[in-house]
Image: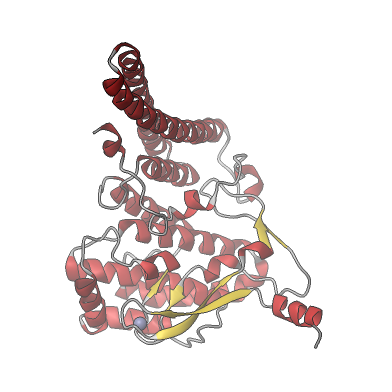
Amino acid sequence: MGDNQQREAAEVSPFLAKAVACPLCELVSPQRRIKRHLYQEQKRDIDLKPLSYHWKGKGLTVQHPLIHFLWHCPGCRFTAWPGAWENPIRGTGLTLTKYRAALRDLPGQDPADAKVRALLLQGWTWPELDYEQGLRLHLLAVHQLLLLKKATGALDSLNLGRYCLRLAWLFRELGERPELSPTATRMAQLAGRLRPLWPEAPLDDAGALRAAAGFYEIGATDAQAVEDVGELCNLLLLITRIHLKLRQFDPAKRYLGRAHELTRNLEQRKQQMEGAYYQLEQRARSEARAVSELARKRQQEVSAQIVELDSKFRGMRFKVQDVRELLQDEMDAPPPGRTAATQVSDAQAPDEDFLDLDLSLKPKKKRLRDLFK
Ligand SMILES: [Zn+2]
């Protein structure tokens, strides 16, 4: 095979695979994700569900990116998105030792829980995933974190929100795509068996959306879960969007109001910094050379902080405005039928960070209060 042919053959697989050690049992297994450059999301729903994809490149088996969001350990069954594989304890307040111990003991604790896990793992063909297994994998991830809560009291609210939101998207698509109707039938049967064992299970679009909002709302009040003001603003806007999708306008307004307030506070802080900057400038002009150099240096620092605050503030204000217009449009619009067309958000597709609230993979940002020391 020539180089070109080899390259073409290599491009046929839409997956990027790598061997990763499980954070729980340390078993090394191949995990994969769809190569991001192979497809483009075209539009998103109000709650940010991707509505359509454009696939680039020839010879591709078109995949469904949503079902490949989670990684799964074939040894201990740990199931989580890649960010949580990297740092599973983030936001839980647990040590890794405690986290591991709790999840290792889980299946034996309660017969109903063990049955739920067995049902979700039935007929497993990992790493080959079809739509149904993608759905079951998300349910497994939610169930696992609820068991962690039961065992330790620690609620991994942001990851629970993240998985429930995606479950809602998967259930929505299940109801909308005719070719998935055999899967829908099987899922309905599975739901019937799960419900008595796991009464609060998110087993449909609206139920999963409500669960996502509930978990994200807890995350938004937990300083351990969200430390950065920009991330908190994104989270509040995401909660607003979920309530909008559920046509719950009062909570939507409340969370939008909180995001707006956050932006206003940031603006005020920026103005205070500007005041400090001008005072330093006057000192630098009027005082002796040694003092003046110090003041100059401090002034440069303050100036850099103002620039950072300014870009954060502008970004947040833009997003708040965007969701505010969406709220107005939704409140003015008649309740939608099932067509997605009336619900399409005109907003630009937000970047990955907005959707994933990918907190753990980013280098730790300066906390806002550090800026004002
Ligand atoms: Zn494992």
Task: Check the image and report above or below for 82 versus 303.
Answer: below
Task: Check the image and report above or below for 139 versus 91.
Answer: below
Task: Check the image and report above or below for 104 versus 173.
Answer: below
Question: Residue, x 64% and y 71% (percent of image)?
Answer: 63
Question: Residue, x 38% and y 25% (percent of image)?
Answer: 267
Residue 116 placement, left or right of 93: right
Q: In which quarter of the image is the N terminus?
A: bottom right
Residue 12 placement, left or right of 92: right
- Comparing 70 with 333, the one in front is 70
Going by the picture, which residue comes out furthest to the front?
A: 289
Label total for image: 0
How far across and down, in percent of the image, does residue 263 sit? 39, 30
Quarter where residue 53 is shown: bottom right
Quarter where residue 152 is shown: bottom left
How far across and down, in percent of the image, does residue 336 sit? 58, 43
Residue 265 visible to the viewer: no
Answer with the quadrant where ligand 1 appears in the image.
Answer: bottom left
